[in-house]
Amino acid sequence: MPYSRVLAFDQPEAYVAAVRATDVELLLTSRGDFHAELVQVDLGRLLMQRGADSLPRIVRISNHPNRAPIVFLADPEQAPVRQAGVKMTPGEIIVFSPAATSYQRTKGPCRWASMSLSAEHLADASSCLVAHELTPPSSTHVVRPDPPLMTRLMALHDATIRLAKTSPAILAHPQAAKSLEQELLQAMVKCIDTQPTETRSAARQRTRVVANFEDFLAARRYEPVYLAEICAAIGVSERTLRTCCHEHLGMGPIHYLWLRRMHLAHRALLLADPAARTVTEIATDHGFWELGRFSVEYRLLFGEAPSMSLHRPPERPWPASH
């Protein structure tokens, strides 16, 4: 049954939890009032999403193994973003490998658009539309379609999102949804049936280094770790790890580790029962032992004291991500 929904958020955790068909982790890299909008349209085979968020951030994207997703910048005037360490500009499309993990970094507000369908449906649609089967790529890459094709895809995506906002009943009608889905699939397939931009083997290698770094952090969770220990565990030099982190994350590995733990502590404070947990317990659980320094840095990053986050009325349960 076709459906659509429009969601608004003032907490990044709730925003990323609502994204469908992928797991997303978001770390804000700048202080400010966060607000975001997420529009989702499910036409049957094709799932579409349009997001807009207000602050610079790093996003870790882990795709669903059974989906074939693409992402592009929704605003022609959008500032470039860094995707897997490579600058991505309006007019380009990221074609994701199933189950791939990658990072996206922005320096300001971002408006993005996505489309996905199963690998089977992609093969069926492409056989009909371009006379050969397209399959999800073995590695994530970027394509730059001919401008008329990209303009057509963006126009159809824009029109669908407008209907979700203003006339959702039209999208809920099976015949209308089927017709629109066919138009969107045709535009999508023609755009991604394009040769990738130049293969960047070195960039893929650096992506693997950052993925191994993230896996190490996930395994150690909140334990204090040291740069030499990390490098030994993932088999790279300190210089290589710093270079890869600056390229993908915009910061060195130690600062990223600190930022990641701060966001985990923030999430834990928002979800905790203030009658059962204390700021001290949550801070030390996440490896922060200098409580005065933690409080100062927390306020600078999130705009409020840790105790205020702990006692804020919760906005849970957050929407499911799938």
Image (cartoon, helix red, strand yellow):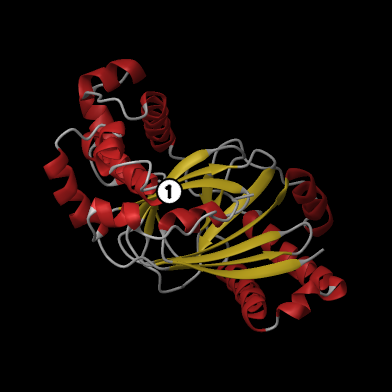
The residue lying at 78 percent from left, 47 percent from top is 123
Which residue lies most toward the front here?
A: 275
The N terminus is located in which quarter? bottom right
The residue lying at 42 percent from left, 28 percent from top is 215
In the image, is 93 to the left or to the right of 128?
A: left
Residue 161 in which image quadrant: bottom right
The residue lying at 37 percent from left, 62 percent from top is 80
Which residue is more in the foreground, 282 or 240? Answer: 282
Q: How crowded is mark 1: few (under 14 residues within 10 Å), some or many (20 or more)?
A: some
Residue 223 in which image quadrant: top left
Does 9 appear above or below 289? below
Location of residue 76 in the rendering, given as x and y in whole percent from the top left corner = 46, 73
Mark 1: secondary structure: helix
Location of residue 5 in the rendering, given as x and y in whole percent from the top left corner = 64, 69
Does 215 appear above or below 246? above
Residue 233 in view (yes/no): yes
Location of residue 83 in the rendering, given as x and y in whole percent from the top left corner = 42, 49
Does 178 appear above or below 264? below
Which residue is more in the foreground, 242 or 130? Answer: 242
In the image, is 17 to the left or to the right of 287?
A: right
The residue lying at 51 percent from left, 55 percent from top is 316
Identify which amino acid the numbered label 1 is placed on.
Leu
Location of residue 226 in the rendering, given as x and y in whole percent from the top left corner = 22, 23
What residue does disc 1 label?
271
